[in-house]
Amino acid sequence: MPLAVVHHPAYCAEIPADHRFPMNKFRRLAEVLVEEGIVAAGSYRQPAPAPAEWVSRAHERAYVDQVFAAAVPSGIAREIGLPMSEAVGFRARCAPAGTVLTAMLALENGIACNTAGGSHHARRAHGAGFCVFNDVAVAIRVLMADGAIRRAMVVDLDVHQGDGTAEILAGTPSVFTLSMHARRNYPVRKVASTLDIALEDGLGDAAYLDELRRALPQALQSFRPDIVFYNAGVDPHGDDRLGRLALSDEGLEARERFVIATVRRAGIPLAGVIGGGYLEDINRLARRHAILHRVAAEFA
Ligand SMILES: [Zn+2]
């Protein structure tokens, strides 16, 4: 069966061309997946933009309304690091809806991937670090309210700590948050996940994969979630602008294969989101994000 992949054209919102956030990677990734034959042309699953009621399950209503109305206070906009226009606000409604849809498709088919998502720095009351709404936290809350899942695990392998996810889901014993990240990287003040694995700068493929092999199977076995949300950020790569680790493309591929195989062999559905990745070369960056979808397709 072909891998179910979720995409919305609004994932790539208009921002100034010289902006440091690589917005065009979302458009290019959707093209690359078709070029590589992972997704048949015209077969992307497109979400409807999330209503405020969904987003408010993970965020304060006042902040949700500010984003929807393109009226985010300048201090918060600065912390997010994106121009909080109507287009960026609309994008922020589509990404969590995409992760909700991805999770529903994963529950149905065993595995599905978004072409965005992993906005793990967004807190309950405000966004931060290029993250407006926390799509994974929204999806977990929406699916739980719906009765579709009772227990969820977040496996966050973006190189930055999943502080927003940890904050929003703290005190929810039915959610296990795992963050493996570079200790010295953003955010300066980290928020405790259920399990944090803080790595030293310059860590390469072998040592990184060892850490993952030590942690993931055991966490899965003891917690037994109904679904895993996998944040496959590619910013642990050695040439990433914002990473501090030293993984290669082959290391990332081995990582995706290990995570997906471990989760799927345990009979647990996996919803993949792309997370961070920062390169000037958008084509190379999009191809790097596509590793997730290419490996996931082996398990579809
Ligand atoms: Zn990151």
Image (cartoon, helix red, strand yellow):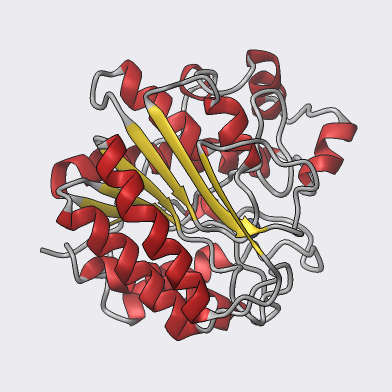
Toward the viewer: 95 or 199?
199
Residue 32 is at least partly visible in this image: no
Residue 295 x, y percent position in the rendering: 29, 72
- The quadrant the C terminus occupies is bottom left
Residue 168 in view here: yes
- Residue 238 location (% of width, % of height): 64, 81
Where is residue 231? Give x, y as percent.
Answer: 47, 53
Residue at (56, 36) in percent of width and height: 165
Residue found at x 37% / y 39%: 153
Horizontally, residue 5 falls left or right of residue 69, namely left
**Camera-side residue of 73 and 48:** 73
* Residue 158: % across, % down: 56, 58
Of all residues shown, which one is farthest toward the left?
A: 1
Q: Is residue 68 left or right of residue 98?
A: right
Pick the front one: 187 or 121? 187
Q: Quadrant of residue 16?
A: bottom right
Residue 71 in which image quadrant: top right
Q: Quadrant of residue 263?
A: bottom left
Tell me the quadrant of ligand 1. bottom right
Residue at the image position 82 percent from the left and 41 percent from the top: 79
Residue occupying the far right of the picture: 75
Does 268 sit left or right of 65 as displayed? left
Q: Dividing the image into 4 quarters, which one contains the N terminus?
A: bottom left
The residue at the point 22 percent across, 46 percent down is: 269
Where 117 falls versus 55 (above or below)? Answer: below
Q: How many marks?
A: 0
Q: Nearer the viewer, residue 97 or 246?
A: 246
